[in-house]
Image (cartoon, rainbow, N blue to C red):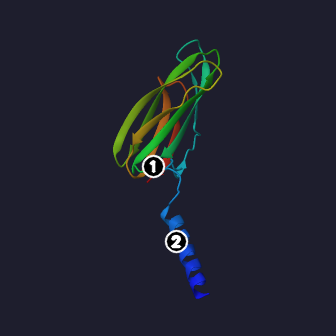
Amino acid sequence: MRVRRWMAGVLASAGIGALVCGIGATPAQADPLPQWAPFGTTLFTFGDANFCAGMINVVLEATPHMPGHVLAQVTPLGYLNGPCGNHVSLGWLGSAGGRSQDVYMHSDGPHAGATVTVDLWVGMGLAKLFANTAPIQSQWAEWYLWVP
């Protein structure tokens, strides 16, 4: 009787230990960032041709296993009178300094286009990131965030 209880305790401890250590854990995925976007995350803009109006969405996530990096996912949500596109300028200021990067978005009409993911080295801690179309044609979006 004592042996059975002892074995049950050993097996339960091993199972709990395996769960705590992460055996069978899912692969690393991007984490949400503590952030505040006072003007929203969507750019309403005019495209680069055909007098087309459209929308571009920007989502920010933490980069798994890379401290100080942010993933910016930029997606054109569609253009009226498309096909059309825009250059999107991403600029940031963080502990790694100030930098910017341009991304070109394109959509074949009123349907969403392909998402472009950009890895931005912002640095750890408090940061500010903003996005706008280039040349400036719309309001901008900005984020205040804490980068792990």
- Name the quadrant of the N terminus: bottom right
In percent of width and height, residue 147 lies at 44, 51
Residue pointed to by mark 2: 14
Judged by depth in the image, the label closer to the viewer, 2 or 1, is: 2
96 or 109: which is nearer to us?
Answer: 109
> SS of the residue at dot 1?
loop
Secondary structure, mark 2, is helix
In the image, 24 versus 131, the foreground residue is: 24
Residue at horizontal 52 percent and vertical 56 percent from the top: 25
Whether residue 105 can be seen here: yes
Q: Residue 32 at x, y = what percent?
A: 54, 50
Going from N to C along the chain, the mark reached first, 2 or 1, is 2
Q: Residue at x 56, y 31 (%)?
A: 75
Residue occupying image coordinates x 45% and y 49%: 64
Examine the image and state in which quarter residue 50 appears.
top right
In the image, is residue 52 above or below residue 72?
above
Residue 88 % position (x, y) = 48, 28
Report the residue marked by disc 1.
Answer: 64
The dot on residue 122 is: none
User: Is disc 1 surrounded by few (<14), some (14 to 19) or many (20+) residues within 10 Å?
Assistant: some
The answer to whether 92 appears left or right of 80 in the picture is left
Residues 33 and 135: in front is 33
